[in-house]
Amino acid sequence: MVKVFLLLMLMSSPNQLTIKYNGILFKSEADCITARDGYMDAYKTKEEQYKDSIITKAFCIPFDAFPLVKTKGIGA
């Protein structure tokens, strides 16, 4: 088993029945936190009108996973 970190990004907007999400795997917690902070910093710089129409949060979630043989991304 290897430990990987899932960057989970959740987005909510008015009058939508669902919450949209996106997830990205990272090999290290530091990489995940850096990506999370960059995502949230980009959101914070948006105009107030945008932030009134979309609320977002991001989390780094650690979990054990089977080793990945080959991926286009992290290669954990």
Image (cartoon, rainbow, N blue to C red):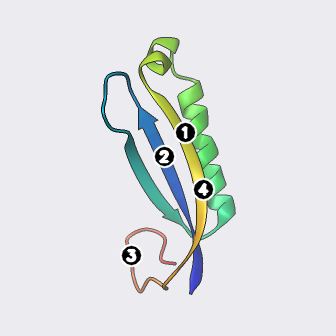
Left or right of 34, for residue 57: left
* Lower position in the chain sequence, tag 1 or tag 3: 1
Query: What residue does disc 1 label?
Result: 57
Query: What residue does disc 4 label?
Result: 60
Element under label 4? strand
Left or right of 62, for residue 23: left
Q: CA distance from mark 1 to mark 3?
A: 26 Å
Left or right of 6, for residue 30: right
Element under label 3? loop
Marker disc for residue 71? 3
Left or right of 71, for residue 64: right
Q: Are marks 2 and 1 in contact (CB under 8 Å)?
A: yes
Residue shown at the point (60%, 42%) measured from the top left: 38
Q: CA distance from mark 3 to mark 2?
A: 21 Å
Element under label 2? strand
Residue type at numbered disc 2: Met
Q: CA distance from mark 4 to mark 2?
A: 9 Å
- Label 1 environment density (alpha carbons within 10 Å; few <14, some 14–19, many ≥20): some
Q: Is residue 41 above or below residue 49?
A: below
Which dot, 1 or 3, sits closer to the camera? 1
Q: Is residue 31 above or below residue 43?
A: below
Residue type at numbered disc 4: Cys
Percent x, y of residue 12:
42, 32
Residue type at numbered disc 3: Thr
